[in-house]
Image (cartoon, rainbow, N blue to C red):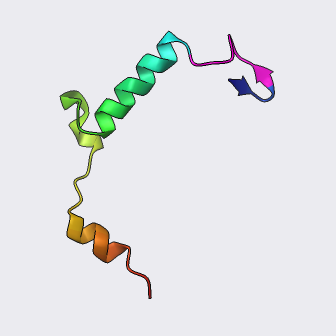
Amino acid sequence: MEVDGIRIGQGRPGNVTSRITEALYRAVRGGDTVHREWITSVSIAEKVSGSQRS
């Protein structure tokens, strides 16, 4: 990984970054009951009608 062209650590996500990423994905996919307020349910009908083109 790089920030402003400077290599960070070993150039790949470490343990802490990996754990944070996994926790975020669990939360936004509904697998984490602690952060349910981060999720807004959308029905399939809403998705379809919202994606129609004119």
- Report the residue at 18% width, 30% height from top: 33
- Report the residue at 29% width, 39% height from top: 29
Quarter of the N terminus within the rendering: top right
Give the total of numbered labels: 0
Figure check: 9 above or below 51: above
State the residue lying farthest toward the bottom. Answer: 54
Figure check: 41 above or below 27: below
> Would residue 38 be found to the left or right of residue 11 on screen?
left
**Quarter residue 13 falls in:** top right
- Report the residue at 35% width, 25% height from top: 23
Give the residues drawn in magenta, as a range: 6-13
- Residue 12 forms part of the magenta stretch: yes
> Would residue 9 be found to the left or right of residue 41 on screen?
right
Which is the main secondary structure of the residues drawn in magenta?
A: loop
**Where residue 47 sits: x, y (%)?**
30, 67
**Where residue 21 sits: x, y (%)?**
44, 26
- Report the residue at 51% width, 19% height from top: 17
> Would residue 49 be found to the left or right of residue 19 on screen?
left
Which is more toward the observer, 38 or 28?
28
Quarter of the C terminus within the rendering: bottom left
**Quarter residue 10 falls in:** top right
